[in-house]
Image (tube, rainbow, N blue to C red):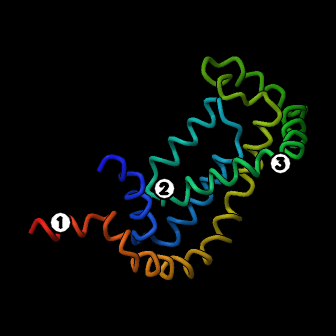
């Protein structure tokens, strides 16, 4: 049963009654997590936020996976965005103060790609939310009904096992 747990959680995530808002927030947070390069405190903190909020975790993790690959392709663009933000004259004092703090340098905010990816993700957060919400409003009920038809899903949910025990 331990080996089936990931599949059970995935089937549950697809068939659970999540609102389109929760799924769209999962998509937006997953996009933000996926765009930021991994291996720093910023990526870890974003992942903790993704996992701790009441949003659809399956959609969030899937979009994080997809946007991790998209983020690699966007590196030249995010480098330019990050370089612009880090070299902006008015923000030089702010960046210096952040870098002098004890924990903040572990976020790698001084890396142009990390800064640019984070800024791009923040800029796209609201548009992705509002564009994906109608999509999930239409597709979620259909997907849930389609997935529930399969015998494997009821087996993963434990319907067969509990039905035989009672």
Lower position in the chain sequence, tag 2 or tag 3: 2
Q: From this view, report whether residue 108 is shown above or below residue 134.
A: above
What percent of the width, then of the height, locates residue 141? 48, 81
In terms of sequence position, does the residue under pointer 1 or pointer 3 come before the other?
3
Q: Position of residue 142 (x, y in %)?
A: 50, 82
Q: Nearer the viewer, residue 8 or 48?
A: 8
Callout 1 touching callout 2 (CB < 8 Å) = no
Q: Quadrant of the C terminus?
A: bottom left
Assess disc 3: are there few (<14), some (14-19) or many (≥20) residues with their C-alpha within 10 Å of its C-alpha: few
Q: CA distance from mark 1 to mark 3?
A: 47 Å
Dot 2 falls on a residue whose secondary structure is: helix
Which residue appears at 51% of the width and 44% of the height? Answer: 49
Which residue occupies 63% across, 34% down?
42
Q: Is residue 141 above or below residue 30?
A: below
Q: Is residue 121 above or below residue 87?
A: below
Disc number lying in front (1 or 3): 1
Mark 2 or 3: the one toward you: 3
Mark identifier at residue 91: none
Label 3 sits on a secondary structure element that is helix
Name the residue carrying label 2: 57
Tell me the residue that label 1 is attached to.
162
Residue 123 x/y as whole percent = 75, 54
User: Which badge, 1 or 2, is on the more N-terminal residue?
Assistant: 2
The residue to which callout 3 is attached is 73
Q: What SS does tag 1 mark?
A: helix
Packing grade of label 1 (10 A; few <14, some 14-19, many >=20) is few
Distance CA(mark 2)–CA(mark 3): 25 Å
Q: With 110 as the anchor, is 160 left or right in this view?
A: left
Residue 52: % across, % down: 44, 47
Classify residue 108 by image quadrant: top right
């Amino acid at each position: 049963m331990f080996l089936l747990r990931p599949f059970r959680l995935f089937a549950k995530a697809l068939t659970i009654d999540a609102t389109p808002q929760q799924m769209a927030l999962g998509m937006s947070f997953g996009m933000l997590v996926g765009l930021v390069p991994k291996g720093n405190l910023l990526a870890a903190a974003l992942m903790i936020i993704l996992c701790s909020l009441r949003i659809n975790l399956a959609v969030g993790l899937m979009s994080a996976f997809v946007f991790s690959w998209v983020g690699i392709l966007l590196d030249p663009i995010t480098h330019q965005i990050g370089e612009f933000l880090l070299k902006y004259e008015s923000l030089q004092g702010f960046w210096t103060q952040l870098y002098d703090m004890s924990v903040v340098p572990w976020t790698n905010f001084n890396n142009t790609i990390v800064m640019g990816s984070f800024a791009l993700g923040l800029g796209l957060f609201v548009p992705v939310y509002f564009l994906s919400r109608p999509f999930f409003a239409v597709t979620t009920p259909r997907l849930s009904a389609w997935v529930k038809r399969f015998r494997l899903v009821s087996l993963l949910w434990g319907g067969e096992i509990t039905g035989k025990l009672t």
